[in-house]
Image (cartoon, rainbow, N blue to C red):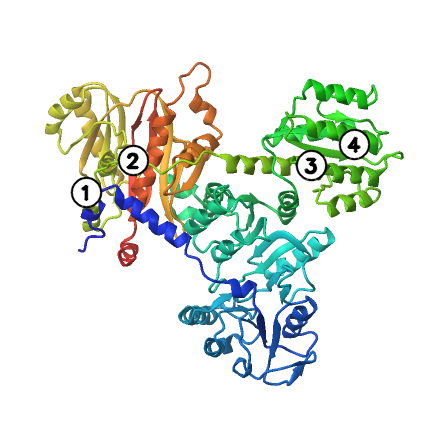
Amino acid sequence: MTSYDDPTKLTTPTMKYKSLQAIDARVHKERDIKSLFEPSSVAVIGASPDPDGVGHSILRNLMMGGFKGTIFPVNPKHKNILSMKCYASVLDIEDSLDMAVVVISGKLILQLLEELHQKGVSSAIIISAGFKEAGQEGVELEKQVHELAREYGISLLGPNCLGLINTDSKVSMNASFSRGMALPGNIALMSQSGALCTSILDYAKGNQIGFSKFISFGNKVDLNENDLLRYLAYDPKTQVILMYLEDLTDGMTFMHLAREVTSKYGAGKPILAIKTGRTNEGASAAASHTGSLAGSDEVYDAIMAQAGVLRVDTVQELFDYAMAFGNQPLPQSNRVAILTNAGGPGIMTTDACIRYGLQLSKFESTTIEMLKSSLPPTANVNNPVDVIGDARHDRYEAALQALLNDDNTDAVIVILTPQTMTDIEEIAQVVSRLAKDTEKPILASFMGWVDVSPGVKILRENGIPHYLFPENAAKVLATMATYKKWTKRAQTKERIFEVDRGKAHQVIQDTVNSERTLIPEWKALQILDAYGFPVLPSRLAKTKENLPSLCAQLGFPLVMKIVSPDIIHKTEANGVAVGVADLESALQTFEQLMNSARQYRPDAEIWGVMLQQMAKKGKEIILGATRYPKFGPIVMFGLGGIYTEVLKDVTFRLAPMRSENAQEMMSEIKGKKILNGVRGEAPADLEAIQECIERLSQLVVEFPVIQELDINPLIVSEYGASVADARIVLAEYDDLKELEKN
C-alpha cells in the first residue's frame, strides 16, 4: 500500500510555514472583476420589448439608472428595443464590450460563452435560472459553464440571481431586474438570495438607507463570496459590508480574507453576516464528542468569530447594525451615557446596556456641575441623565454637549418620549448638529411612531441611527464596542513546536496499512507524545506475566484500560479500572478487564491492558478536532468529563490558529470561572491549556488524514496538565486516496 504521506517531508518546522504561505497565496489571489462593477459598455443578451419581461426590466433599469457607459440590447428577433438598436448577436456589435447581462435559456449559455470569448468580454452576469436548483441536469450544465468560463477567463456572477447595482456616480449601473435603483450610500450588500434582495431594497428605501454596491450572486457557478469580498475590501465607496449567506464555498479562505478586511491592519471594514441554516446537520453521524458537538452552525460561528465577522440573526438586526456602523464613529471603549426625558425608558436602557456588556459612564465632576447648572433641580444628573418630561431642545442641547465633552464617556444613547411640550424636530436638529462635531457615536430612540416621525426623518437624513426602542440601540452599541475591541486586539503569531513527526507518521501509517480507521488510546497517546503533549507515563501489558515488571516501572496507584481497535468506548465495555493500588489488585483487574471485553464483543481483537499512572487531582478539560469539508480541521475546547455532550460548554476555532485564538477559546466558555478557581480552589494552569490547544492545531494541520481526535479528559492542575484519555479516527480509505491526489 502506498504511504499516504512522506515522513521525510515532515521533519522540520518550516514545512508548516510553507503550508500557511500556500493558504495566504490562495487568500490573496485576486481575480480582476473590475469590468463587472465598472464596465464602460454592457450588452443585455435576451433584451425584450415585453414590459413584463426580465430582459426588458434590466434594459430599462440600465437606462433609467443613468448608466454612464454604452448599452447594447441583443436579441435576434428584434431590430429596436426602447428606441435602441438591437443586435442579433454580440459578435455583431462593432464596438468593444466589457460586460454582458444574460437573460436567455440555460441551454444556450455554453454557445454564448464561446461568442463572448471571441468578442473579448471579460465578465458576465447570468440572471437565468434552470441550473443546479432545477435538478441533476442543471448540475451538469452548471459544471460545464464553470469549466468553460474558467478556460476563457470570463468572470461569471450567478446564475439564478437578481443582478448587480453600483451606485458610484462615475458608473451609476443598475444591472438587475429590481423595481428601481438603490439609494447611494457607503454600505455594500451581497446576498445569495435574489428574492430577499428585492425586499431589502424596498425596506432600505423606506428607511433612507443607501448602498455603494448591491450584489445578488445566486448559485456561485464561478464568482463566490470570497471574490466579491476581495473587491469590496478595496472599494473606496464601501465602508460596511453586509452578507446574506446560505453556505461558504471555501471556509478557510473566507476566514483569512475576512480577518484582514475587518482588522485595522487590513481594510478595517466591519462585516455583518446572516448565515441561514442553524442546524446540527451532519453531527448525528459523528462518533466522537467533537464531531457530535461541532454541528454546521457551530463551525460557522467559529469561522466568523475567528475572522471578526459580526453574525446577526435577522434582516432587521442586519440593518440596525449597518445604520450605526455606516454613519457613526466607533466607540473607543464600552462606557456609555444615557440621556432621556423619561425615567422608565432610562432604567430599561440601563438594564439593556449592562445585559449586553456595556458600562455606564461615571461622569467627571465638571460634567456633573455643568449638568446641575443647565438642568432644573428635579433633573437627575447622574447616569442615566433625566432632563425631565417638559424638556425642550435647549435642555437636550446643554445636557448632550456636557456628556460628549466628558472624557469618561465613549458613546451616548439619546431617548425621547413625545410630550405636549416636546419640540421633537428641534431636538432632532440639536442631536444632528452636535454629532457633526464629535468623534463619539450617538444613537437615538425617539419612542413612538406618528408624533416622532418628523424628528426621526431629520435624524436619518443626518446619519443618526434611530431605533424604535432604546434596548435595540444598546445592543447595537455593544456590538460596535465589541468590533472596536477586535480592531485594537494584540495580534499574536502562530507558534510552531519542535515535534517528532516521523514517530507520529509511523503510528498513522501502521493503522492505514492494517486498513483500520480507529487508532486506539494506546497508539493515540504515542502520537500525542510525539507532538509534545503532557502524556501520562503508560505501558502495555499483553499478558499477566508482564504485570510485575511494568507495575514496578510505573508505581501505584494505576489506571488500567482495555486496549482494542474494535472497542471504541471502553467504559461501555467495563474496560476501565481506576485507583489500582497494588500488584495483587492489578493481577485481578487484568483478568476482569479481559473477560469484560470478551463478553462485550467476542470477536474483538484485544491487544492487552494499558497501565497508566494516575493523574494529579485537577479540572477536567476536553480538547478535540474534526475535519469538515470546505473548512478543514476544527479545534474544540471546553469542560470535559462524562457530561460534555449534556452541558455543551465548548467553543470552536479553525486550524491553523494563532495564540490569540487559543486565548479567546478559553475565555468564551461559560465555565471559565471554574478554570480561574472558585471557593478557594486553585486556578487551572491556563498556559498549559493554551499550549495543548496550539499543539493540537499543529497536529491536525500537519496530518490531514486525521478525521477526528478527542482528548477527554485533559486533567489540568494549578501547575501543568496531563492527557488522561485520547482517541483518533482517520479518514475512510476512499477519502484517504482523495487526500493523496490533493
- Tell me the residue that label 4 is attached to: 397
Q: Nearer the viewer, mark 2 or mark 3?
A: 3
- Give the residue at the far top of this rendering: 680
Vertical comparison of 719 with 592: above or below: above
Q: Residue 502 has which mark?
A: 1
Name the N-terminal-most of marks 3 and 1: 3
Residue 659 in the image, given as x and y percentages of width and height: 38, 35
Density class for disc 2 (Cα within 10 Å; few <14, some 14-19, many ≥20) is many
From mark 3 to mark 4, how far is it between C-alphas?
13 Å
Q: Secondary structure at mark 3?
A: strand
Front in this rendered view, residue 703 or 491: 491
- In the picture, residue 644 is in which quadrant? top left
From mark 1 to mark 2, how far is it between C-alphas?
20 Å
Residue 246 in the image, given as x and y percentages of width and height: 52, 54
- For the residues labelled 3 and 1, say whether their Cβ atoms are less than 8 Å apart: no
Density class for disc 3 (Cα within 10 Å; few <14, some 14-19, many ≥20) is many
Q: Secondary structure at mark 2?
A: strand
